[in-house]
Image (tube, helix red, strand yellow):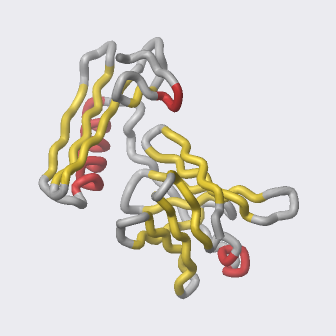
Amino acid sequence: MLTAGMGHWGLGIAVQGDKKDNLYFTHGGANEGFRCQLVAYENSGDGAVIMTNSDAGSGLADEIIHSIAIEYGWPDFQPVERTSMAVDPKILGHYVGTYEIAKGFNLVVTLEQGQLMTQATGQEKVPIYAESETKFFPTVMPAEIEFVKDDHGSVTRLILHQGGRERKAPKKF
């Protein structure tokens, strides 16, 4: 079950970390009104299961995992401090569009009063902040969005870095 295959997935669980010392596995779950997250280290046996009774419980579960990581010295779930920077609104305008993360699941990027906003299919809008001219992050979840340009400078896709995975999403329009 803990042999990482395509996309860092074992048999039903995501497998991450240093295979020799810090191999860990994760799995999240959701039903209407509930969110949960499992994290466990193979070698040490350390782990946590967080269960919430809210559709918005994933953010709380992430914060709890970060707190546990600080307390017990888990190397992989330490909170990341980020600094935002200003980016010219003309550049931000190039990122506006719809990006297909998976069939039937899009990430729509809009520019509202100088602020880039993202909205995943069926979810609320979330502001994202520039870490560099092409890398952005939300503050409501641990993720990073990287916009990719072609040789002519046109934005052709984005890469969503979240949960130890990279999801490449081509720009549809």
Q: Position of residue 16 (x, y in %)?
A: 44, 27
Who's the residue at 55% across and 71% down the image? 109
- Residue 123 in the image: state x and y as whole percent: 36, 66
* In the foreground, 149 or 91: 149
Residue located at (20% from left, 51% from top): 31
Q: Residue furthest right?
A: 152
Looking at the rendered image, the quarter that the N terminus falls into is top left
Q: Is residue 68 left or right of residue 93?
A: left
Vertical relation: 99 (above or below) 15: below
Camera-side residue of 140 and 14: 14
Say which of 156 and 16 sits in front. Answer: 156
Instruction: Residue at the far left: name it.
Output: 53
**Measuring 72% from the left and 60% from the top, which residue is drawn there?**
156
Nearest the camera: 36 or 59? Answer: 36
Residue 118 spot, x, y in % from top left:
49, 69
Relative vertical location of residue 140 with respect to residue 29 in this rendering, above or below:
below
Q: Residue furthest front?
A: 103
Quadrant position of the C terminus in the picture = bottom right
Residue at point 66% right, 74% down? Answer: 92
Task: Measuring from the top left, give residue 72's x and y in whole percent.
Answer: 27, 30
The residue sitting at the bottom extreme is 113
